[in-house]
Amino acid sequence: MSLHSIQPVGIADSSRQIPLANSYVSAGFPSPADDYVERHLDLNDKLIRHPSATFLMKVEGDSMINAGMQDGDLLIVDRAIQPAPGKIVIAAVNGELTVKRLTLHQSCYWLQPENPKYRPIPLDESNDCFIWGVVCHIIHNCI
């Protein structure tokens, strides 16, 4: 899985507010819908914690498919969040960017894919690695 298009997230002047409905949508039994907009919501407020350290990256490949990450998805990556075991990270391994889950096993850190077709990458002297940022959100199309 590789990543393309590192793009800074525009915040200040490019904010676009989206209407937020007053009711919830049922993921179980259907419920009557309200035709009432409660307020407007700026997605930057919901998705971006550290604007100056946040970037969008586009996914290519399927090594993280079991984490809900699909080819073509946009990732919101925050470089201000501390990488920790269990978090999905963007890492530069031997000069190439990849997205994997950071794990700790027997005192060694690993980059763990979320697809059994791929092998984990040990973060040891055999690989030159730099953790570039932590993935906060995945944006993908439903259609």
Image (spheres, rainbow, N blue to C red):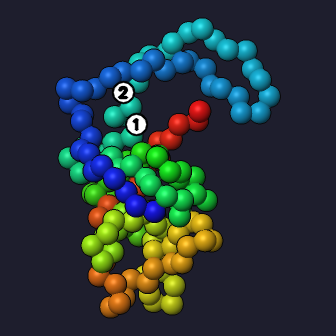
Classify 125 as above or below 1: below
**From the viewer's perspective, is 31 left or right of 132?**
right
| Vertical side of 28 occupied by 59: above or below | below
Say what secondary structure mark 2 lies in: strand
* Residue named by callout 2: 42
Q: Are marks 1 and 2 in contact (CB under 8 Å)?
A: yes
Q: Which mark is residue 82?
A: none
Q: At 50% across and 41% down in the image, what residue appears?
A: 140
Where residue 103 sits in the image (x, y, percent)?
Answer: 48, 75
Pick out the residue farthest to the right.
29
Q: What residue is shown at x 42% (from left), y 45% (from top)? A: 74
Label 1 sits on a secondary structure element that is: helix
Mark 1, residue position:
46
Residue 134 shows in this picture: no
- 121 over 70 or under it: above or below: below
Q: Residue at x 50, y 51 (%)?
A: 71
Local packing at callout 2 (Cα closer than 10 Å; few below 14, some 14-19, many 20+) is some
Hey, what amino acid is under mark 1?
A: Lys
How many numbered callouts? 2
Quadrant in which residue 88 is drawn: bottom left
Q: Is residue 41 left or right of residue 5?
A: right
Instruction: Characterize the local packing of mark 1: few (<14), some (14-19) or many (20 or more) Cα atoms within 10 angstroms.
Output: few
| Outermost residue to the top | 35
Q: Position of residue 114 (x, y in %)?
A: 57, 66
What residue lies at 60% left-to-right and 8% top-to-bottom? 35
| Placement of 2 over or under 94, stated as above or below | above
Give the image location of residue 3, x and y in percent: 37, 57
Q: CA distance from mark 1 to mark 2?
A: 7 Å
Q: Is there any visible trace of residue 56 in the rendered image?
A: yes
